[in-house]
Image (tube, rainbow, N blue to C red):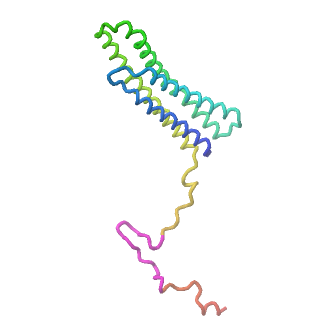
Amino acid sequence: MISLPQALALYDMANQIDRLRFQLRALAPGSAPSPLSAVTATVHALAGINVAVSDEIRSRLNGGLSADTMKAVEAFSAALSPLGEAMTELGRLQAEIALYNFTTHPMHRKNPSVLEGRRQRVAELTTECCEAADEILEAAVGELQAAAIALAPSPARAQPATPARSPLAPSRPGQTHATPAIPPSTAVPAVAPHAAKVR
């Protein structure tokens, strides 16, 4: 069961998810809550990946379900669960940052001690949610890549067999030149001239 197109589609989706993980790492908490716009952009990108996975499944269900197509549908379907878990983590983070920006900060701007405590909580939650989402997405990438490898043509089938070793190639480690069995200057012709005349 080998299908290069299905394998490439799975690899492409794995790469999209992997790129999203770089966006997650950019949400490092630092000394202030992550900007709401940055978190929202990451959530939007993850939502786009969810839609893309659903489209991949739907396009295959509308065609003929060969064995390799069914395997691809299974792999894409399995990716929806971790993508949903990652969305939950980012949703928690976005809700907390929105609460801090629009409720906590206006209410406690004159109370630095309270504000600092809430700010610290948001920073901790940023680390917690981003690390959890990154771990979840990393697992999803691994599963998609494994499914792609299972469907990709084997390199052994795609390439010709390894040619026989040249007589001049080293015969064992440490030997730089192997001596030819018959020196080129004294090699016997395939058919001796006199042998060709005798019947």
Q: Residue at x 48, y 37 (%)?
A: 142
Side of 78 where 23 appears, left or right: left
* Above or below, 44 relative to 173: above
Closest to the observer, 26 or 185 = 26
Q: From the top left corner, tell me how far across and down residue 46 is, in percent.
A: 52, 27
Q: Quadrant of the N terminus?
A: top right
Does 144 sit left or right of 128 as displayed? right
Tell whether 182 sits left or right of 4.
left
> Vertically, is 129 above or below 178?
above
Q: Quadrant of the C terminus?
A: bottom right
Image quadrant assignment for residue 105:
top left
Between 153 and 115, the residue placed more toward the observer is: 115
Indicate the position of residue 139 as horizontal and vertical percent values.
Answer: 47, 33
Q: Is residue 174 magenta?
A: yes
Report how many numbered discs are placed on residues in the image. 0
Q: Is residue 158 magenta?
A: no
Q: In this view of the protein, which residue sits in the foreground, 20 or 31?
A: 31
Q: Position of residue 15 (x, y in %)?
A: 51, 38
Residue 61 drawn above or below residue 196: above
- Main secondary-structure element of the magenta-colored stretch: loop
Q: Quadrant of residue 78?
A: top right
At 61% from the left and 41% from the top, the residue drawn is 6
State which region is magenta.
Answer: 166-185
* Residue most extreme to the left: 113
